[in-house]
Image (cartoon, rainbow, N blue to C red):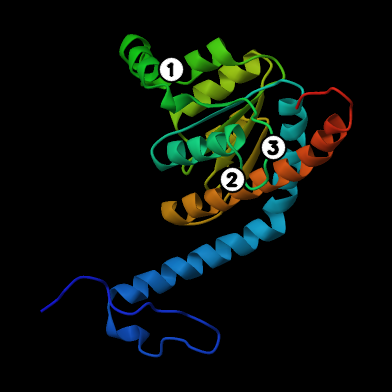
């Protein structure tokens, strides 16, 4: 009789590898998925890391000077946008001060009211008009790069003097063209694009923390300064 649990843990090392991978038909698809992700990450490591490092430095400057990050996406990309803002308001790894970051899709009453009164294409643009200030940063995440509400938000942000960055799927695409700068993940699968975006979000936080650490250290060295 089965009494719960999933059996012994499977630990994969260089020395111990599965040698019967073809016995389950779903494993072929899983192998393809892993191969697609590895290829996307290889391309990201070669071409995307410099942009992420640059964004981390510049975001640290904006937020340390009292600016704000606004972020938005749809579906899984909304979850990743909120993941990013949570790491900034809370922390990623190191203990540090909180920084101002808002995930626009998480404002549920605003989203539903704006969607009801103005249409879904305006749910983010209207909030950008309300919360964004010149010099702030708007981060938009989209696996397709074709979401009308994100493109409208980019247009509204540029009109108000915000800097617009986009994480998208394969380019060229309309959102990448609407943003000031974009990082386009070349992959054929939506899942692979999202997984690479998550890596980009974590590395952005890593670069951000590295950039704010010297600033925090100098502030802490000033007598009587509260940080």
Q: Tell me the SS state at disc 3.
A: loop
| Whole-percent x, y for residue 166 in the image | 59, 36
Q: Judge by depth and name the residue closer to the eye, 26 or 93.
A: 93
| Whole-percent x, y for residue 90 in the image | 58, 36
Q: Judge by depth and name the residue closer to the eye, 60 or 192.
A: 60
Q: Tell me the SS state at disc 1.
A: helix
Task: Characterize the local packing of mark 2: few (<14), some (14-19) or many (20 or more) Cα atoms within 10 angstroms.
Answer: many
Q: Tell me the SS state at disc 2.
A: helix
Q: Rounded to the nearest whole Å, what is the CA distance between mark 3 and mark 1?
A: 35 Å
Q: Which mark is residue 122?
A: 1
Q: Which residue is mark 2?
A: 201
| Whole-percent x, y for residue 78 in the image | 44, 36
Extreme front residue here?
A: 224
Q: Judge by depth and name the residue closer to the eye, 190 or 3.
A: 3
Identify the mark nearer the N-term, 3 or 2: 3
Discs 3/2, front: 3
Q: Is residue 23 left or right of residue 49?
A: left
In this rendering, the answer to whether 152 lies above or below 55 is above
- Image quarter in which the C terminus is found: top right
Discs 3/1, front: 3
Q: Is residue 47 left or right of residue 80?
A: right
* Picture residue at 57% right of the left edge, 14% below the top: 131
In this rendering, the answer to whether 54 lies above or below 23 is above
Q: Mark 3 touching mark 2, by CB under 8 A?
A: no
Q: Which residue is mark 3?
A: 96
Task: Characterize the local packing of mark 1: few (<14), some (14-19) or many (20 or more) Cα atoms within 10 angstroms.
Answer: many
Marker count (numbered): 3
* Picture residue at 78% right of the left edge, 41% below the top: 213
Identify the mark nearer the N-term, 3 or 1: 3
Task: Characterize the local packing of mark 3: few (<14), some (14-19) or many (20 or more) Cα atoms within 10 angstroms.
Answer: some
| Whole-percent x, y for residue 92 in the image | 61, 44
Q: Judge by depth and name the residue closer to the eye, 119 or 139.
A: 139
């Amino acid at each position: 009789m089965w009494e719960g649990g999933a059996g012994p843990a499977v630990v994969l090392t260089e020395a111990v590898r599965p040698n019967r991978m073809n016995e389950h038909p779903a494993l072929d698809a899983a192998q393809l998925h892993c191969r697609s992700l590895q290829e996307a990450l290889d391309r990201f490591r070669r071409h995307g890391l410099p942009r992420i490092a640059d964004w981390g430095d510049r975001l640290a400057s904006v937020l340390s000077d009292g600016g704000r990050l606004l972020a938005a996406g749809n579906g899984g990309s909304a979850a990743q946008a909120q993941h990013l803002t949570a790491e900034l308001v809370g922390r990623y790894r190191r203990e540090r001060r909180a920084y101002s970051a808002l995930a626009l899709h998480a404002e549920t009453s605003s989203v539903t009211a704006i969607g009801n009164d103005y249409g879904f294409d305006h749910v983010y643009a209207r909030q950008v008009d309300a919360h964004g200030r010149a010099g702030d940063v708007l981060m938009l995440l989209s696996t397709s790069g074709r979401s009308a509400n994100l493109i409208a938000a980019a247009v509204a942000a540029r009109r108000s003097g915000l800097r617009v960055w986009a994480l998208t799927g394969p380019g060229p695409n309309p959102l990448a063209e609407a943003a000031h700068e974009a990082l386009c993940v070349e992959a054929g699968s939506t899942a692979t694009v999202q997984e690479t975006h998550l890596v980009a979000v974590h590395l952005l936080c890593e670069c951000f923390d590295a950039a704010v650490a010297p600033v925090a250290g100098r502030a802490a060295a000033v007598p009587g300064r509260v940080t």
